[in-house]
Amino acid sequence: MLIHRLKSSIKIVLTIILLCVTREVFAVATFLNDWRDFYPDSTSSDINCQLCHADRDGGAPWNAYGSALQQHFSQSDPLTREIEDSFSFAEGLNSDQDNPSTSNLAEINLNQQPGWRAGQVNNIFNADGEIIGVTFPPTSVDPFPEKIATQEVSLELIEIASGFTSPLGASQAPLRSLSSQFFVVDQIGIVWRVDLETGDKSEYLNIQSRLVPLGAFAPGGYDERGLLGFAFHPQFSSNGRLYIHTSEPTSGIGDLTTVASIEAANHQGVISEFIVADPSQSQGLAAISSERELLRINQPQFNHNGGDLVFDSQGFLYIGLGDGGNADDQGPGHSIGGNASDPLNPLGSILRIDPLGDSHGAYGVPSDNPFINDNSALDEIFAYGFRNPWKLSFDNQGNLYAADVGQNDIEEVNRVTKGQHYGWRFREGRFFFDANGERDGILTFDIPNNLPFITLTPPLLEYDHDEGISVIGGYVYNGSRNPSLRGKYIFGDFLSTLFIGDLNDGSISKMNLAPEIVIFGFAQDSTGEVYFMGNQDANTSGTTGKLIKLQSTLPEPPEDDSLCFPIVAENQNVSVVCL
């Protein structure tokens, strides 16, 4: 989890770790003191001691169930009352099953104690026998025990441009005269025009005045709001249209119904259209001839906004939206069962609209959208069941991919098809997820009682938090410089990790490269080569943001390569052979 050579980032990470460890040590000590107050005879054969210790006398070490309970109580307050209620009930429930000749752990594993089940979520009860929480199942603490292997790649990291604040994405205009330029989305409200050959940059669009003040916890600090998406219309060369997704102060009631009222909304996500007077303009700020607002959506919290915008070949616009924030997709501003699973709520879904249509006011809806004219769902929804889709992309076959940021354990990448539910909040990756009432939600092998009677589409790629904390979606590589990567999904993790995903077998490997930035996004140029971007501290201030190219180290083929072809060895090394 270390960010390579980032002194400021390491300082932040260490500060967080120290704070968490200090709290954890204090809480565990409190738990142990309360335990001793309730059960001073800790070597007796009392069921409560057997439940948590490895031997019948209640001695060290803790068994897996004791450790799980200890972890649970270390996060609970007040501790004493919960310990008393839970263990008192557990004793009454299980004492008639106690077998003096069998250790408590063995009884649990044999399912001889009905309140505590082997390898599954175990209930925490109060004195009345009501379930008030659960412990984490020991067998699923590490969803993927096998570590992801590192792959040697014929790539190097080439810095293209720097001086950004918080670059989230980049794209090229569908215009031949601008093919040497990238347009980089900076979260603070600027779209930068970048010359890919010289690295020079200049402002192309500045909408900073529209945004909410950035810095969720301190001005200029971390935030998930801002300028989140930018896209050129496929016919930009003739119609001059481009689109942005911004986080703005609340104004009006919003266009699509969410649980968050205008009074309760943290902000509104706004999709706007601009028309550029001269699309071929090669430098300077874009001359905007007109603008209009297409869509305004209430967002209950500052986080989980998604925000990406991409067009398909038909000119339809796809809008990625997170579940609205908070943990477990519940709480103020969230539907019963979660926004992401509510097809009448736009949050936690990917919308598809026709920005040039007018059937729904400022935009149209494609006639083949999966829920068109369905009164139980929004016409605009293309797919749903997402927690926080962070980056969308199409491959050259027209397949749509969405990386979805997980909560506690699993990060995933999905191939998105219309009408499908991608699992959240009933699944996190391939595993079931229990929102767990007012407690922290958990991963589980148990089927939730409220599982809907619909198909939940599993991800193509997934990894756990041994490998990172937040997936950053990328692109299917279709460049010519690295044949061994063709058809592979190039993506990453916030914690400075670059991945290669095999979309056929679901395997993932790490690149043997060490980015020196926190990764926020990826980009792909017209030749199919891939770039990534980010900054050094994950803040929305400063100028440490960079755009970096994954540059091939293979020899360039000659201009006339009709008699040249790549040879891929068993170790994945590639050479170009010419006859």
Image: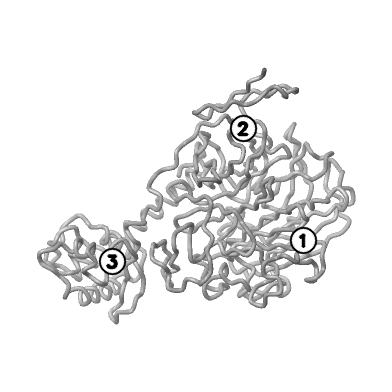
From the image, state whether disc 3 or disc 2 is nearer to you: 2
Ranked by sequence position, the earlier of labels 1 and 2 is 1
**Dot 3, how many residues are within 10 Å of its Cα: few (below 14), some (14-19), or many (20+)?**
some
**Dot 1, how many residues are within 10 Å of its Cα: few (below 14), some (14-19), or many (20+)?**
some
Q: Nearer the viewer, residue 197 or 450?
A: 450
Residue in the image at 49% along x and 28% along y:
571
Can you say whether 212 is above or below 279 in the image? below
Q: Position of residue 6 (x, y in %)?
A: 52, 39
| Helix, strand or loop for disc 1 | strand
Measure how far apart labels 3 and 1 are at the Cα level: 53 Å
Residue in the image at 33% along x and 79% along y:
130
Q: Is residue 573 left or right of residue 345?
A: left
Q: Quadrant of residue 372?
A: bottom right
Q: Quadrant of residue 215?
A: bottom right
Furthest-top residue in view?
Answer: 579
Q: Nearer the viewer, residue 378 or 550?
A: 378
Q: Amino acid at mark 1?
A: Ser
Q: Amino acid at mark 2?
A: Pro
Q: If the image is split into quadrants, where does the N terminus sit?
A: top left
Measure how far apart labels 1 and 2 are at the Cα level: 39 Å
Q: Dot 3 corresponds to which residue?
A: 117
| Helix, strand or loop for disc 2 | helix
Residue in the image at 60% along x and 69% along y:
300
| Helix, strand or loop for disc 3 | loop
Ranked by sequence position, the earlier of labels 3 and 1 is 3
Color scheme of the displayed model:
one colour
Q: Dot 1 corresponds to which residue?
A: 272
Q: Is residue 354 left or right of residue 319?
A: right
Q: Dot 2 corresponds to which residue?
A: 483
Q: Amino acid at mark 3?
A: Arg
Measure how far apart labels 3 and 2 are at the Cα level: 50 Å
Q: Which mark is residue 499?
A: none
